[in-house]
Image (spheres, rainbow, N blue to C red):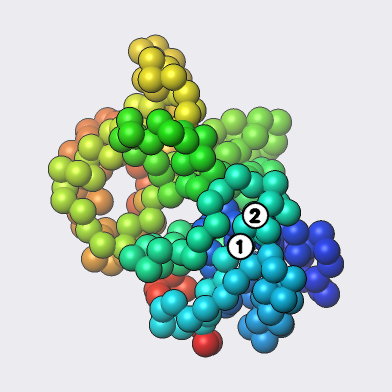
């Protein structure tokens, strides 16, 4: 998390990068990121909008959304296409952001010098090869080597499940994630190489109460492979419409 206190340009830069990587966030989530009041976060977003680096709008129940403009993305050195978050994805985007915020405040995250690799970044690596229909997780958490964390050196796939998919589809996605060996954007021949270490040591599923039973059944259907799937409930803040408008 960005440390508390008056936001400095560097803190603003980190927050801009976070917003860009998550496609967009609601103002209460920006406040949590900056560790400031919702009113202070709204003032920050207003300054971004005045400078042309971000835009804001009421896209859903709850607080306003903020996302980066083309100028804001360029300031962050990111090649993403500038656009407001898609309306059909807002609930999912909020849930993934809530999961990321909850994870990054854990003491293990800081102790392990972990970092989040966003779905947007993974998709950018795939680029024009998205037609290969690779499943892209909602994020990755990387735990670098050289720390005292027991899982140092691992990469985890993160999935946020708000609504249940079919059991068969969930099994297929889990198997694809857990058997992958190559990075996203690699050559097709390197996606799954027999004998190589799996890319994702674990798949962490953060689920709503409705989605959890299907995810649990899918994990059980995988047998030994399913031992690398962890299931947790999404934080309460993941629900669309939470927070102060």
Q: Which residue was labeled with disc 1?
A: 68
Residue 70 drawn above or below residue 222:
below
Q: Is residue 244 above or below residue 240?
A: below
Residue under circle 2?
73
Quadrant of res 95: bottom left
Q: Is residue 123 left or right of residue 215?
A: right
Residue 118 visible in the displayed image: no
**Label 2 crowding class (10 Å Cα cut-off): few <14, some 14-19, many 20+?**
many
Label 1 close to label 2 by CB (< 8 Å): yes
Q: Nearer the viewer, residue 222 or 13?
A: 13
User: Which of pointers 1 and 2 lies earlier in the amino acid sequence?
Assistant: 1
Q: Residue at x 49, y 65 (%)?
A: 84
Residue depicted at 48% across the width and 81% down the height: 58
Where's residue 152, x and y in %?
61, 34
Q: Report the residue at 15% width, 43% height from top.
A: 168
Q: Residue at x 52, y 78 (%)?
A: 57
Q: CA distance from mark 1 to mark 2?
A: 6 Å
Decide which of 225, 85 is in the foreground and name it.
85
């Amino acid at each position: 998390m960005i440390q508390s206190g008056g936001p400095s340009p560097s803190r603003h830069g980190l927050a801009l990068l976070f917003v860009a990587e998550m496609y967009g966030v609601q103002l209460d989530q920006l406040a949590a990121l900056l560790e400031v009041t919702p009113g202070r976060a709204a003032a920050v977003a207003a300054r971004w909008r005045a400078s042309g680096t971000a835009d804001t709008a009421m896209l859903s129940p709850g607080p306003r959304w903020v996302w980066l403009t083309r100028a804001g993305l360029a300031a962050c050195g990111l090649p993403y296409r500038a656009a407001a978050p898609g309306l059909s994805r807002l609930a999912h985007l909020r849930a993934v952001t809530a999961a990321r915020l909850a994870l990054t405040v854990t003491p293990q995250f800081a102790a392990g010098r972990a970092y989040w690799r966003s779905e947007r970044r993974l998709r950018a690596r795939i680029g024009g090869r998205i037609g290969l229909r690779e499943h892209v997780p909602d994020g990755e958490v990387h735990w670098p080597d050289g720390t005292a964390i027991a899982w140092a050196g691992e990469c985890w796939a993160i999935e946020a499940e708000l609504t249940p998919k079919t059991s068969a589809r969930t099994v297929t996605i889990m198997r694809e994630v857990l058997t992958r060996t190559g990075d996203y954007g690699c050559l097709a021949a390197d996606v799954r190489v027999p004998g190589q270490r799996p890319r994702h040591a674990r798949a962490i599923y953060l689920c709503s109460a409705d989605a959890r039973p299907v995810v649990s059944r899918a994990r059980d259907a995988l047998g030994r492979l399913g031992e690398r799937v962890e299931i947790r409930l999404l934080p309460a803040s993941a629900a669309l419409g939470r927070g102060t408008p």
